[in-house]
Amino acid sequence: MVAGAIVLGALAGLIYLIADALFTHNADFRRWYNVLRAQPYRYEGIQPVYLETDPASLIALPDAEAVAAKRRAITKAVFGRPDLPREARPDAIERAIDPRGVAALAPYGDPAVVATVDRFSVVVDEAFTAKAYLLHPLRPNGRLFAYQQGYAGTIDKAAGLLRPLLERGYTVLALNYVGYGESAVHRRLYPGHGVFVPGREHFLFDPLPLRRYLLPMVAGLNQAMEDLGVGQADLGGISAGGWVTVVTAAMDERIRRSYPMAGAYPLYLQQLDHHPPTEEQYYPPLVQAADYLELFVLGAVGQGRGQVQFFGQYDRCCQNNRLSELYAPAVRAAVDRLGGFFYTHINDESPDHRINEDYIALILGDLDALDK
């Protein structure tokens, strides 16, 4: 019996090692495993309630005047004023820093690709100073690409996209999300309420809590555009960084192309999601100023402007399934009528929450076509 137990134990251990190796190294196995253990409708099929909403009815943008009014409304929800703070600049600028001192910059220290790196510091409030990095390519092409990382990682995870852009000559403005890397959040005294460790307390006590998420990008863009002498930039981001991409492009007409990746679904398509949006994404003044479908339209309309959204059907984190197919025709119709470009792309292979290779290829191809 002892020998049998030993054999069974060894067999179980072998099965575990094989399954672990498959899960770690085989994307098809991870996708199969995730689907097998998932709740209904997570990756495949549509929740019936989602079909009860007509997405076109959520887009109240009949003309250019309505577009401008909506843009002012969302900018006021974020910054407390109807116009974008184009005067905002970093509070400190460090030119030509040593990237070896910043863990998130590890993939960008190759002198054959990156000439220098500047670091911007944007003081948002008493508890939060954001850091942004301006990566100067060895052979600049005069274009600026801004990138916003999301939760659970720093900008080193975006090297598959940012390094090819740098090799093509794009100057890259890269930011970590609030609380990550050097963009750490510290405890803060709120007069009349006490000292709070970092959390969601700023939504209770800060009159403009979305400044934490969006001012660093706007101030960084203002400075980078001034440094390069350009009037436009392209913008991408993943996960919560995709949400920053959506809102920034909706407010800032200087964004030529925006590429939100696994970043935002309309809220009605997330009501039964196992991974609901974080608090900043359903901040009442923002969603009362504009529905997310209207944010998509605002980010795509205008001469030479456009938005390409990327999703992973089997993404184990967020914005999975094929729900963009429900609203894309309505958004595209509004954008076509107002003038602009809108497209959605769904990866149906990767189970991982990341910038997939097909995203990179499409972004690079789109930018190459624009810059010819």
Image (spheres, rainbow, N blue to C red):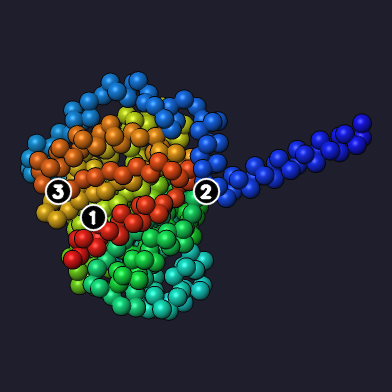
Can you identify the residue that label 3 sits on? 340
Q: Crowdedness of circle 3 by 10 Å Cα count: few (<14), some, many (20+)?
A: many
Label 1 and label 3: CA atoms lie apart by 10 Å
Q: Quadrant of residue 63?
A: top left
| Res. 262 in view | yes
Considering only vertical position in the picture, is 43 above or below 21? Answer: above
Dot in front, 3 or 2? 3
Decide which of tag 3 and tag 2 comes sooner along the chain. Answer: 2
Label 1 and label 2: CA atoms lie apart by 37 Å
Q: Are marks 1 and 3 in contact (CB under 8 Å)?
A: no
Can you identify the residue that label 2 sits on? 197
**Residue closer to the observer: 372 or 126:** 372
Residue at image position (13%, 51%) is 302
Q: Quadrant of the C terminus?
A: bottom left
| Res. 85 in view | no
> What amino acid is labelled 1 in the image?
Arg
> What amino acid is labelled 2 in the image?
Val
Residue at image position (22%, 25%) is 54
Can you identify the residue that label 1 sits on? 257
Q: Secondary structure at mark 2?
A: loop
Q: Crowdedness of circle 2 by 10 Å Cα count: few (<14), some, many (20+)?
A: few
Q: Secondary structure at mark 1?
A: strand
Q: Crowdedness of circle 1 by 10 Å Cα count: few (<14), some, many (20+)?
A: many
Q: Report the number of discs.
A: 3
> What amino acid is labelled 3 in the image?
Gly
Q: Secondary structure at mark 3?
A: loop
Q: Quadrant of the N terminus?
A: top right
**Side of 289 relative to 187 (left or right):** left
Give the percent coordinates (x, y) of residue 358. 37, 52
Give the percent coordinates (x, y) of residue 101. 51, 72
